[in-house]
Image (tube, helix red, strand yellow):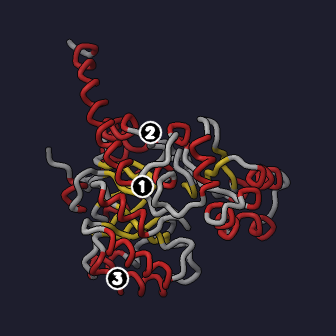
Amino acid sequence: MRNRVCELLGIQYPIIQGGLAYVGNGALAAAVSNGGGFGQVGTAGRSPENFKEQVRIAAESTDKPFGVNLPVSEHSDNTPYIEAILEVKDKLTAISLSAGNPKPLVPLFKQAGLKIMIMTASVKHALKAQELGADLVICEGFEAGGHNSPLEMTLFSLIPQVSRELQVPVVAAGGIANGQGVVAAFALGAEGVQLGTLFVATKECEAHDNYKKLLIEAKDDATMVMERSIGRVTRVLKSPFAQKILEFEKTRPTVEELLPYILGRNNRVAAIEGRIEEGWMNCGQGVGLIDTIDSAADVVRRLAREAREVSANLDILQNVFAE
């Protein structure tokens, strides 16, 4: 059957890997694409030089389409990253823009021949993304790991409302970690899914083994939200360091006072260096479904297989809701 996400990106399955700050590396992007999904190299937490190196690694490791992620407000100056992306554009199929206003960047990257994916978290912003020229809109629910919208809308309420209003394809992101989640997203009106945490727990991801071990040991209540005291929402794994941040937030600190705790370097220390007692780690609410560390290519294929099996088993609904 026709799937607009697959046609747009030139992929087998409408499964997209999130940008994944610090850990969205080239080997991971290539493995996801080799499995039939759409891998992405993240710019967040990388120098422009390292980013270009990761794109090179991805391009040498797959002949399938892949892209990059640029969180607009992540960098104090996006210019070096824009230049880096344009330098490697011939290796890329698409760019996803998140965490900030994409308006100035859309014409630039469209002119470069890239498909545009814009991440949003409300009907209003999804419509704006479509108006700006997004080829597809990624709607991220409050279940997702990392930085989320302070609107705190869940996928169950967000996707049906957005898909009803948009003409371009909608991709669901947040808390999806198995075939049931994939099928549920499609039932809500999505035409594709984006996953982050599940792809951290893969062999190719450069996340530290200590981080991956925590992911496969995690239960359903393993995440928490920090930064609400300054009007932001960041979902992370529960840990002594994250709990310390939460306790400090109860004192109603200023942004300047809280900043030393939430700087990206504290994410890197835990996620990349494995010093989990000294930093925090992004994590989505679907983490309780993760129990193995596999190749990202196998993860994509497993998601597709599970989605087929779940869809087949839903035939029973025809009888349940028969007239």
Secondary element at tag 3:
loop
Residue 72: x, y in percent? 49, 72
Q: Which mark is residue 209?
A: none
Residue 78: x, y in percent? 50, 82
Q: Are marks 2 and 1 in contact (CB under 8 Å)?
A: no
Lower position in the chain sequence, tag 2 or tag 1: 1
> In this figure, which residue is indicated by the disc labeled 3?
88
Q: Is residue 99 visible?
A: yes
| Pick the front one: 314 or 291 | 291
Q: Residue at x 27, y 54 (%)?
A: 36
Please state which amino acid type lies under the numbered disc 3: Val
Residue 160: x, y in percent? 36, 40
> In this figure, which residue is indicated by the disc labeled 2?
157
Q: CA distance from mark 3 to mark 1?
A: 32 Å
Which of the two marks, 2 or 3, is nearer to us in this view?
A: 3
Please state which amino acid type lies under the numbered disc 1: Lys
Quadrant (top left, top right, bottom left, bottom right) of the N terminus: top left
Residue extending farthest to the left is: 1
Q: Residue at x 46, y 65 (%)?
A: 98
Which of the two marks, 2 or 1, is nearer to us in this view?
A: 2
Describe residue 174's horizontal placement relative to residue 231 as left or right: left
Binning the other alpha carbons within 10 Å of mark 3 as few (below 14), some (14 to 19) or many (20 upward) gives: some
Binning the other alpha carbons within 10 Å of mark 1 as few (below 14), some (14 to 19) or many (20 upward) gives: few
Which of the two marks, 3 or 1, is nearer to us in this view?
A: 3
Please state which amino acid type lies under the numbered disc 2: Ser
> In this figure, which residue is indicated by the disc labeled 1?
124
Residue 159: x, y in percent? 38, 44
